[in-house]
Amino acid sequence: MRRGRLMKLITAVIRPDDLEIARRALSAFGAPGMTVTPLLAASRWNRHLEVYRAEVLVADLVPRLRIDVLADDEDVPDLVALLARIGRRPRGGDDTGRVWISAVEQVVRLRTGERGEPAL
Amino acid sequence: MRRGRLMKLITAVIRPDDLEIARRALSAFGAPGMTVTPLLAASRWNRHLEVYRAEVLVADLVPRLRIDVLADDEDVPDLVALLARIGRRPRGGDDTGRVWISAVEQVVRLRTGERGEPAL
Amino acid sequence: MRRGRLMKLITAVIRPDDLEIARRALSAFGAPGMTVTPLLAASRWNRHLEVYRAEVLVADLVPRLRIDVLADDEDVPDLVALLARIGRRPRGGDDTGRVWISAVEQVVRLRTGERGEPAL
Amino acid sequence: MHLDYIPYPATGYSSGDAAWQLTAATLVGLMSLPGLAVLYGGLVQKKWAVNTMLMAFSAFSLVLIVWALWAFNMGFGHPWIKTTVNGSPSGFLGRPGPAMGAGQEAQADIPLLDGLMPKFNFSQSALFYFQFVFAAITPLLWLGSVIGRMSFKAWLVIVPLWTTIVYSADAFMLWGGGYWAGKGAVDYSGGYVIHLSAGTAGFVAAAVIGPRLKRDREHGAPNNLLLCATGAGILWLGWNGFNGGDPYFAGADAAAAVVNTNLATAAALLVWLVMDYALSPTKKPTLLGSINGMIVGLVTITPAAGYVNGLGAICLGVISSTIVWTAWYKLSKVWIFKKVDDTLGVVYTHGIAGLCGGLLVGLFADPNMIVYPAGTAKGSSAFSVTGLFYGNHSWHQFWMQLFAALTVIVWTAIGTFVILRVVGLFMKLRLPDAVLESGDLAVHDEEVSPPQTLVAVGAASPPAAVTPTAVEEPESTASSSASEP
Amino acid sequence: MHLDYIPYPATGYSSGDAAWQLTAATLVGLMSLPGLAVLYGGLVQKKWAVNTMLMAFSAFSLVLIVWALWAFNMGFGHPWIKTTVNGSPSGFLGRPGPAMGAGQEAQADIPLLDGLMPKFNFSQSALFYFQFVFAAITPLLWLGSVIGRMSFKAWLVIVPLWTTIVYSADAFMLWGGGYWAGKGAVDYSGGYVIHLSAGTAGFVAAAVIGPRLKRDREHGAPNNLLLCATGAGILWLGWNGFNGGDPYFAGADAAAAVVNTNLATAAALLVWLVMDYALSPTKKPTLLGSINGMIVGLVTITPAAGYVNGLGAICLGVISSTIVWTAWYKLSKVWIFKKVDDTLGVVYTHGIAGLCGGLLVGLFADPNMIVYPAGTAKGSSAFSVTGLFYGNHSWHQFWMQLFAALTVIVWTAIGTFVILRVVGLFMKLRLPDAVLESGDLAVHDEEVSPPQTLVAVGAASPPAAVTPTAVEEPESTASSSASEP
Amino acid sequence: MHLDYIPYPATGYSSGDAAWQLTAATLVGLMSLPGLAVLYGGLVQKKWAVNTMLMAFSAFSLVLIVWALWAFNMGFGHPWIKTTVNGSPSGFLGRPGPAMGAGQEAQADIPLLDGLMPKFNFSQSALFYFQFVFAAITPLLWLGSVIGRMSFKAWLVIVPLWTTIVYSADAFMLWGGGYWAGKGAVDYSGGYVIHLSAGTAGFVAAAVIGPRLKRDREHGAPNNLLLCATGAGILWLGWNGFNGGDPYFAGADAAAAVVNTNLATAAALLVWLVMDYALSPTKKPTLLGSINGMIVGLVTITPAAGYVNGLGAICLGVISSTIVWTAWYKLSKVWIFKKVDDTLGVVYTHGIAGLCGGLLVGLFADPNMIVYPAGTAKGSSAFSVTGLFYGNHSWHQFWMQLFAALTVIVWTAIGTFVILRVVGLFMKLRLPDAVLESGDLAVHDEEVSPPQTLVAVGAASPPAAVTPTAVEEPESTASSSASEP
Ligand SMILES: Nc1ncnc2c1ncn2[C@@H]1O[C@H](COP(=O)(O)OP(=O)(O)O)[C@@H](O)[C@H]1O
Ligand SMILES: Nc1ncnc2c1ncn2[C@@H]1O[C@H](COP(=O)(O)OP(=O)(O)O)[C@@H](O)[C@H]1O
Ligand SMILES: Nc1ncnc2c1ncn2[C@@H]1O[C@H](COP(=O)(O)OP(=O)(O)O)[C@@H](O)[C@H]1O
């Protein structure tokens, strides 16, 4: 069968303070690698206030991290469940992000030129 | 029918000053949420100059914002049209970005573990 | 035939110092445009150390750049090969990133509203 | 050998007083550059930091040129139209004239003050420079009211006019031996001439020029609190020169003024801090709030520094900080204060604070705080000021202080208004909205922390290293791209 | 005219000494604000920068109020319980009392030092202020040990208590003519009273309050080295006032103290740099390491500045820097030093460095370094200090230095411990972990470089410009979305 | 009691002059640290900020050690090989020797100047320190030419050699009573000895060491304009000590020098601003351009500060700023100036500006600007300098200025070249390209704003909280992952 079709990209929007725990869990699980992108999330929760010289400003775009993990199809359920467990930890009424999965047609490891699964 | 197949990710590269208007339009439309990622865009337009100590430097990577919105298939046309209308506003001969749509297989709301549409 | 199905998004995680060479190669190739997003990559290589007041700290998230290029299906092989060649240049035992390809269903150029290939 | 040379010009010259005067002046200079420049540069939006700092540097320079060519003598020279107040010669403005020749090396002299204070123990150059740094900081202060939309070009034109017409007159009336000096109104080192005037001018200018972009007013977050603290710290300690230098002698009153300056400031900072704690919407103490309080303390003690005792200084700090805090939170919500876009709130921290300080001199001035001790000659008496709470409990000083304040407010307001309107006839005072959108980049082609990806123009030829020639392993990639349904 | 006025109060007044005393005091003030505030502000994690700086500004203010209301006289006034040491009156603590009246304009005086040193050539205000800036910087120094978890409210309570109970006593014993001064122990300008004390207090406080979050200890990267350099530079040069002002006269010894200060500092910085080069794990010279070395040099010369000659100063710098470098790398790995979370390592760069300097005075003090020359009156002799390597090679001075050091350490440790424990009964000394997670934002609603996307509350109404009305070209988009398998 | 002690050593000692000398020296010190350190630290690419600042801190330290051990006496001591110029003793370099003993507390003295100027009113230590801060800032200035590729280790070796061989000689010839002093060439406070020399040395060093990476030259954007402004402001005001301290007395000429310094600077800044406005490619005024203009003004007035009157000062500022602006834009495009990679353009803002100022002294020096008034003794005459436009309109002074300039240029160029070449035999002067790629991190393991994600080594054990155990709801996820065609 053609492996290419079964590679996935798992994208998660998580809270910055969950980064470490997520990374450790992922590497403990054996996920080969990941990328972490800081972004701003429009959340219906957690619009924290900041005050400068008595002017109350609202941060309605809260800082979040986007994690991208390329994974083999078989690992996806476990990885998602794992992220879900982290995200689900009780927290001050507050958003806890999203995870979504999309298909990847091909992956190339630049260093070696390997393609497909071995490049994960 | 399987909902998973009909979730999409709308990605837009917009100009920073369009952020606010875009956000308001999206929330007015009822888009559940979004993420905003600052990035640099290679644009064939608008390579603005900066001058430091008489050295003229060109910013040929212009700051742009990437907006990611997970949406139900049905909403995609409206959302795209909406973003298009914003982007189309007359502007100093200048790039106005891209929008592209890709398929998403699954979405999970970490806080609750909900999947698929309800997690949007 | 429907062009929409044959647009792809090429995503590459590269080293910051490869940016320039990559950009030049891409534009020389005629790639219409691109976006560059700074991110942190979890790499099994190259965890460089930093030392502050005798405390040795490890940067196990190394700064990398994510390049997104929307491209016509036909150009994908060339573009990937091109990126691969850049990434493959000998370097201090060190990660050199990934490239992955995913399908895009629709692309809109905001300025003009053009869709599909012409919007690339 | 030594007797053969005297390194000083006049007898009565004291190297100690000269050293202190130059040191004090330098400290005040540091309050402007880098002090105010980086305090304001850190307080404004990131997109305005460069513009703000360049306005500060250029104004500082413009004032000096004007000061040397004609303005110093308008503030401290011979009266233009002589009048008499209480029998002694007086006036409202000095006769313009350059202050640049070798004659500046002679002993310092302020004509109308001859005999009213000890002869200066240093040269005219020292006096000139000391007074310059005061003249220079004033427009820098009210710059805080107009940043974020004022045309840079207009700024370059307005500052010299303002120094000439507004500042010189205020200075002459209170410090140059002019009308209010004669009347007995006092301003130890600029609560009126500098701060009340800056607050007034800033407010008027903000009104005339118009507000910032709605978007900028809504996004008024500062950009760097480390630099705010840097500037604030320099302001506080620099103020030792600001108030300590004003008796013109490194005497006991100079030291007392320094102590009072710090006491009032500490008190005001703590009061603001506590009020933020107790009464602010979020009930949290803030750094920028404390810096506001600090500035209020520094400003309010300025007109009183050498006239009140330590307890009085603390009282001034507490009272003014309470008043200004309240104004900042409440007054800003009402009417004109809500309408006029005073970007950094100069009218509160300088205008109101300076006014409070000046008036409180009329209450707290302690006659035992000797500015100049009595001399040996008969009939000579020590110089000090008596407020309501001392001596024969008279309101006289208070009224003098009040009238002088009103004069300064009115004169400054009218002068500023006219200058702006007139200049407005020849050039736009406000930048076009398109420019305001991008800020520093549009005005100066600079931004405060430039992206490190900027590349020199003409340095963009494709490198030999990689050229998109024949592509290797096409099949495998082909297969990959073919690998979709 | 001139004779008619004397701008100074007492005879024996020197405007030169007054000028220098005020200048020196201002330089020391600048070391605190903005010096230490931004050095520490840049050294801590980004999330604690605002909190750190506000603690600095507020402590500086609190100390001044306390100093004026009662503490100055506890350090430099009349002894509370009179004792006698070597026949002359002495004590352990001064009688509390305000120092705020007009009387402060009189000639300066430290009762127990009458006759032991020249009469002051300036007013009490100048002395008061000079001693204040020393009192103020001390808690700011040991703030470095407790940042990253200490409750801001507790800080506001503890600083005044600490200044009153701990600092005043240390100052009185060594500078106010108290017990150790009588015994002949010397501390030129605060190696013990300020730095050894700060190191001790910081360490004890860090132990009592408890460590930072494990996560923060693991992520202890500084946030801005440009500001570290800014603060460090101000510290170095400000120290010219710190040590140069302490003879109380702008005499030869003041200049010598300035030179020695710089020599020891340069030597210590270079030693640290070289040791980093040669012995550190990564064998690289670092800016922050060099700044550590610089601070060690400044601190270690402080108790010795005017007593040693240039060569001695260099020796002090080299020896102390070697010792502290070793302690920093090795001692920090063992036992209690590993356990106690002294955030910025104040116990090393101030505690140990100050101790070394104080003890080395007992070895390197050069009797030819004259602090006060002998006068004309018979029996009057010059004042200088003799260390082991000079004169009759006696260990006496060394023992005095050692015993004084022990007194300071013990008194400071006990005092600090008790104050913290007692205050701990009424409020939490440590912030709750949830607050520690976010730092500045949780404590002050501010962050050091605020995001420019912040928007004013209530400014979020949807704009008229774009409303999601009837969608155009739905078909095409529909087709696009339909365009998948 | 008071008579019993005299706090000063020699008669003729003036606490006022001593206070001013120490204050001035401290201001100059602040120009280096933090002034230049953060100005340059902010001007360079982000990746070089730490390296730049550490080079500044270490050079400052190295120069002091060298200065104390032998170099001060090479610049201001007895001539090594005695010669005579116009009948009085002279020379080219002083005899090396330490300046560290207790003897430094004696009255200051520059042997070859005895009788040519008033006796110093302060101790040798004060003179030593004042001259040190000048010696120290010079290599820091030309550091600006070589940052971005120079080996840190080589820097540590070269600075001491350069101070010894190049700086001392330049200083001796013009300030130590050496050859050009005897000839009547003047350099008020370092237009030649410091700035012309720094510009020359920097240019030569840049040429010998070679350029930065092509990539870095193309991406030469600064990293933080807030810090540039901080440093620039400290430079400007610190210059009051730079030029104000050089008459060695807090007399009238010191004050005049301060005023002139500011006048020239203001004029030069405004000229650069206006030329950017009118003639620069983008026709916009810039902050960094104005700072360039400011530096040009400060540098150009330095050799002339106390010799010209106010109008002359303005002229110097205008002329030099015009010349340097033109050189900056035009000269930089041609020939060797295009080829040599002078990172921050020190050759323009210091070399050319210093040269202009020195030569213009020959035109604008006003004989009525009295540096030292005539004494009482018969035959004693006041000291001042006469330029072409005054007195009997002679070109003499101009020629002297020109020849002295050439001497400084030639000596500095040769000295610098030889030192670099020789050191180059033992170690690489330029860092390997691989290191240049990453900058600070490679050289110091530090970066100017460290990422807050850095984690301490060995702090990476997986937490108990979450372990990837049995996966819950596998089916649902399975279904989801199965949910593709
Ligand atoms: N439709 C969406 N598209 C993209 N990102 C989204 C979307 N909905 C939510 N998110 C992201 O997921 C995060 C959590 O969503 P939010 O609705 O705020 O909390 P929760 O989902 O836990 O109720 C948000 O910060 C937002 O960035
Ligand atoms: N092929 C592409 N892949 C990724 N991003 C692109 C692509 N083409 C354009 N973009 C992004 O869209 C933005 C607008 O594109 P550009 O061609 O510059 O202007 P316009 O499309 O309006 O003519 C650019 O800034 C670029 O970042
Ligand atoms: N499974 C993955 N998902 C997402 N990004 C990955 C993945 N594996 C590697 N990467 C990214 O690609 C980069 C190179 O991967 P790495 O394994 O460290 O080196 P190499 O692949 O060259 O051996 C890493 O920095 C990481 O950010």
Image (cartoon, coloured by chain):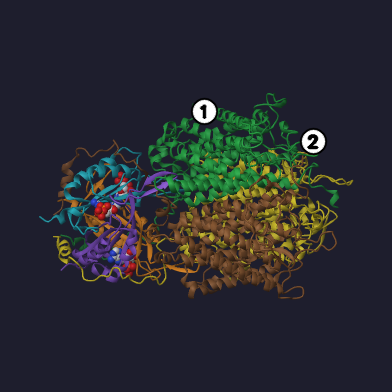
Chain colours: A cyan, B orange, C purple, D yellow, E green, F brown
Q: Chain of mark 1?
A: E
Q: How many marks?
A: 2
Q: Amino acid at mark 1?
A: Phe
Q: Viewed as shown, does residue A75 lie left or right of D44? A: left
Rendering coords of residue E429 (x, y %): 48, 32
Determine whether D364 is above or below C16 in the image: above
Residue hosting label 2 = F1
> Which quarter of the picture shows residue D63?
bottom right
Q: Residue E417, labelled with which disc?
A: 1
Q: Amino acid at mark 2?
A: Met
Q: Residue D273, labelled with which disc?
A: none
Q: CA distance from mark 2 to mark 1?
A: 43 Å
Q: Nearer the viewer, residue A9 or D8?
A: D8
Please tell me whether mark 2 or mark 1 is closer to you in this view. Answer: 2
Which class describes the residues within 10 Å of circle 1: few (<14), some (14-19), or many (20+)?
Answer: some
Rendering coords of residue E434 (x, y %): 40, 37
Q: Chain of mark 2?
A: F
Q: Are marks 2 and 1 in contact (CB under 8 Å)?
A: no
- Say if disc 2 is inside 8 Å of ligand 1: no
Rendering coords of residue C44 (x, y %): 28, 49
Determine whether D54 is above or below E144 in the image: below
Q: Nearer the viewer, residue E261 or D69?
A: E261
Circle 2 sits in a helix, a strand or a loop, which is it? loop
Determine whether F433 is above or below D301 in the image: below
- Say if disc 1 is inside 8 Å of ligand 1: no
Rendering coords of residue C50 (x, y %): 39, 48
Determine whether D399 is above or below F85 in the image: above
Extreme residue toward the left, this view: A1
Circle 1 sits in a helix, a strand or a loop, which is it? helix
Q: Nearer the viewer, residue F271 or D470?
A: D470
